[in-house]
Amino acid sequence: MQFLSDNAAPVHPQVWRALQAADDGDTPYDTDALSREMDARFSALFGRECAALWVATGTAANCLALATMVEPHGGVICHEESHIEQDECGAPGFYLHGAKLMLAPGEGAKLSPEAIEMRLKGITRGVHQVPAQAISITQSTEYGVVYRPRELAAIGALAGAHGLGLHMDGARFANAAAFLGGEPSEAVGPADVLSFGFVKNGGMGAEAVVFFDPGKAEVARWRRKRAGHLQSKGRFLAAQILALLEDDLWLRNARAANAAAQEVAGGATDRLLCPVEANELFVRADAAERAALREAGFAFYDWNDSTIRVVTSWATDPAHAAAFGKAIARL
Amino acid sequence: MQFLSDNAAPVHPQVWRALQAADDGDTPYDTDALSREMDARFSALFGRECAALWVATGTAANCLALATMVEPHGGVICHEESHIEQDECGAPGFYLHGAKLMLAPGEGAKLSPEAIEMRLKGITRGVHQVPAQAISITQSTEYGVVYRPRELAAIGALAGAHGLGLHMDGARFANAAAFLGGEPSEAVGPADVLSFGFVKNGGMGAEAVVFFDPGKAEVARWRRKRAGHLQSKGRFLAAQILALLEDDLWLRNARAANAAAQEVAGGATDRLLCPVEANELFVRADAAERAALREAGFAFYDWNDSTIRVVTSWATDPAHAAAFGKAIARL
Amino acid sequence: MQFLSDNAAPVHPQVWRALQAADDGDTPYDTDALSREMDARFSALFGRECAALWVATGTAANCLALATMVEPHGGVICHEESHIEQDECGAPGFYLHGAKLMLAPGEGAKLSPEAIEMRLKGITRGVHQVPAQAISITQSTEYGVVYRPRELAAIGALAGAHGLGLHMDGARFANAAAFLGGEPSEAVGPADVLSFGFVKNGGMGAEAVVFFDPGKAEVARWRRKRAGHLQSKGRFLAAQILALLEDDLWLRNARAANAAAQEVAGGATDRLLCPVEANELFVRADAAERAALREAGFAFYDWNDSTIRVVTSWATDPAHAAAFGKAIARL
Amino acid sequence: MQFLSDNAAPVHPQVWRALQAADDGDTPYDTDALSREMDARFSALFGRECAALWVATGTAANCLALATMVEPHGGVICHEESHIEQDECGAPGFYLHGAKLMLAPGEGAKLSPEAIEMRLKGITRGVHQVPAQAISITQSTEYGVVYRPRELAAIGALAGAHGLGLHMDGARFANAAAFLGGEPSEAVGPADVLSFGFVKNGGMGAEAVVFFDPGKAEVARWRRKRAGHLQSKGRFLAAQILALLEDDLWLRNARAANAAAQEVAGGATDRLLCPVEANELFVRADAAERAALREAGFAFYDWNDSTIRVVTSWATDPAHAAAFGKAIARL
């Protein structure tokens, strides 16, 4: 029973169908009909004009988004446990040509306006210091908690007041949107660019970078090519994304994953590090307890010496989730 | 009848089967069984120990290969019409952190030892000039001609004498190998790293970077992650590549493409810019002739004012190729 | 008798005096009174508002200038024999984060509007190619010839029509201005940024980057610091520059250098590669002739197998120049 | 009475004499006799073979040193209050092409082996994380304290065990060496490269990068040129450095600065943030106390709301230092 990662989940059957339908010899790169449909589909989804580019990975999506906001001598305020800081092997340093990640703390890997302001207050020495040019937040966060619309509004106001871009790493944006009630524009708030994740939610290898200022997408198009991310058979990436947008499949998948997480959480209430709002749980468990759970057939990662990370996906069998919850309760 | 690009060809049925078989929830990134099989499969293919990494595009493959050979202050000798110079939007400048492409001329986009030596002789002013650190050649070339083993040996000897790395851009390596008789080690010669193309030859979105000094692959692994090219469901990239290696499908596909090109060439002998050795033809045709061919249902790109580019693929219908050859002959 | 390079010339006595006067413990970096005076002095010199930054070298000046105009995925059209292409060890690749130098030919290392347009016409394939974002010209050129005001106007018009920045490498701007009659605004024409050289013209280690759109200087200030070029005792760089601007010392020095060049040229009229307009001569001389000149006590560099380069400076003894001219005439 | 910064100190008279003696028209860049003498002089000073390069600033020195140790995908462990992290506007990100500074805490801005090991222990996730490739320490530290030889040995052992390079930022190396008794090899310990500061200690605009593995200097030579730091009249930088090495002037200057710091410290013992070991003091003083000191004619920077920074130099008048100590004692 697999709770290691939503990366291990299979490709959704409707995505498979869309992939095969796309095998039609259309024109290369992003000149095919499917790729050209993306802007309109995301514009409809968010209720305002967007420009959207596909790329294969969340790392590329985050970096291309930030590259439109941050100069090589600039900086990005982000959480000290964010994916861009911890898990991307310095990819932002590469794509942003040495720009600096400016770390701030916060419960549940969430940035607060206060933490951001504290970081900004430390920047006082002119050209001797890196100027902040953007804020990057993760929705849902590395710890599976979700920014509420008023929290997003407060961060957006701060960004506006300081002339900073606002980027949202939405590797699990779907799970956040599902938690908040299913309205994507509420879940994204005033972000300027969203890395909208599909790989963990039924896709094979496609994410979208959604620009709410369509003009900003132009620079990203050059940078995507320059980074080797303009796939020549791009129609297969667009196909995945459009399939997941169709009839809100992305949202239905996320709801299933969130529900499975709640099922597990039900048995772990007194052991949870953070509230369970999306599809990740951080559960306190000592070595003996982990061994017992693994012995019982549950696969998961150790987060640190005292905590395990449990991840559900659109494909998690609800019975497995219930069993896991019970097994934890029994410890 | 489509002769625009081998990028427009469909995904081969065996690749589709392999993709679906890979949808098994194996571990992420390149830790799955298929990804771990790649080194052994390429080692068997080339008859010597290799390390092989998958990436989604030829641009990424070329750049990651070169990044293991060239320092940011170094240079790469390449043909002035090579893909890395002309068509990758400066990707080598990005991946190599500003290293320089040092251009040399040559018939059929082929580099000769003489042209390389001429370039090297101009480098005499110590730290005021960029030092050459690698040579990059394309097999088959941008003009569809193929380096012979003795030509490769001569370039390899020159590279060795000057301490330069040797990279081969093999976006159409399969077509070159098919032309040379099907022995991959002959087609690659003494190259240190090969960008081995599969996308144009039946794949969906996977190329291999093959290191003949396996130790060199380590740096490329970090750089791949850092460039956002370590896909989390990497099993689907490995699956494509392994499917194409199985029972020499890559070679059979290339032979079919080459045969189709010969079929077209048969009708165009007195109009060819270069000998047709792989799956590309450059055919002299004026505006009226182009219009006539398009009128007759043939799709192709204009190369310049007097020449068209015709590309065949594994999926080109031999009857279409024959018809195209006849149509050209009739002009 | 030294004709190797204007780099070998001594520091002018008035510069020495200014350096010593600056040893007054003023505030660090560019907050001292002398550094703060630079904008006004260059604005007065050019008759329009400028912002000017000091740096230690022409390479840094050129690169910081270009960094305000060219994005990492962009390109700079320049002459194939320009200093930024030939002699700076790839510095533009470093400072511009991999942007491309797009080479064009031209007599006397001069770019013509036609050569620039030809280069621009080749850029047609969208994101697959690097977009040109700036033109860089050298005044006086690598071959010691000078752009006339109407030539500058034509290039400026072309830059404007294509939305390109215009940079002038003025390592020997003083010699060009002296040749053109001493009006600096005519010599700079419609350039957006000028690298104004002082080191070769009586300075010790200071050049100015002059921005004719003062707002553009802001980015250069960050980049200067980031490149380690914001010297903490910057007052000593400002002092050199201001001393050379005082009473047109820069122009008087350049006139002396140009006059010395004319003196040499007088004896070499039938051997000159280019017209002598500034302080460099390229003189045809075979191996025996070179040996004879060196035997007679003249020091100079070989430019290639058939040509020598002769450079005069503000400090060239007119008698030496006359002697050199006679020695060449006598060959 | 000036205690703002050692940057504001004048150029030492012997440095002036050396500068003027160097105005001899020697060959350009670093081919002159003085530049060529540097290796031997530093080798004699440290009692082992070194290669030494001049550059104009400490930022350039630090970055060129690190660029020989750290790949673009690598990281440098350094103190969270180090100059490379806090005060260089992201210069290491520029010179190291996006490599990461990995911050560690420590009293007095000193790194301990424990803090370094803690940082290393967090690096466990393969290519998903930046690998550490070097350690950078500052001697004396940002807080004016000095690493003892056994502390350096312990850090060197750790670096060796993990295959990391060891860099020493010695902007105030002279003050550290003076404190430790004047033996430079003890003060540098097992560092692989030293940024040896001269600007704050009597120079005008020259620092040395000293490589204890001379082979490593080669890469730095290319990078220096590429960064625009190879000044054409390099003889003037070498002259400053050699003048300060002559008869241990560097050490005598540092002893004078340190003695002045002790003089001030004598009056501030109960207010010191750190022990005073070099030429910087961090003194607790509230707003009223600061005002009183400034009223009395003492100039210094506020470090934060409760602390002032006091810096002495080789040129600090001992009477001023004594007066400042007394003024603080009187508060």
Image (cartoon, coloured by chain):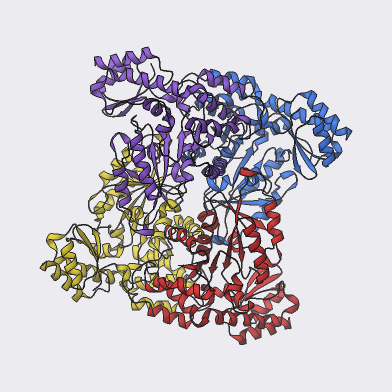
Chain colours: A yellow, B red, C blue, D purple
Q: Quadrant of the C terminus of chain D?
A: top left
The image shows residue A156 at horizontal and vertical percentages of 31, 49
Quadrant of the frame with the N terminus of chain D: top left
Residue farthest toward the right in the current orientation of the protein: C330
The number of callouts visible is 0
Whether C257 is drawn above or below C71: the answer is above
Q: Position of residue B123 (x, y in %)?
A: 67, 49
Q: Is residue C306 left or right of residue C101?
A: right
Viewer can see residue D76: no
What residue do we see at 44% from left, 45% from top?
D93
Whether residue C125 appears in this view of the structure is: yes
Q: Is residue C297 left or right of residue B47?
A: right
Closer to us: B270 or A28: B270
- Quarter of the image for residue D311 reads top left
Q: Position of residue D134 (x, y in %)?
A: 41, 46
Q: Taking C1 as reference, is A105 left or right? A: left
Q: Residue furthest bottom?
A: B319
Question: Of all residues shown, which one is farthest toward the left?
Answer: A330
Q: Position of residue D193 (x, y in %)?
A: 46, 39
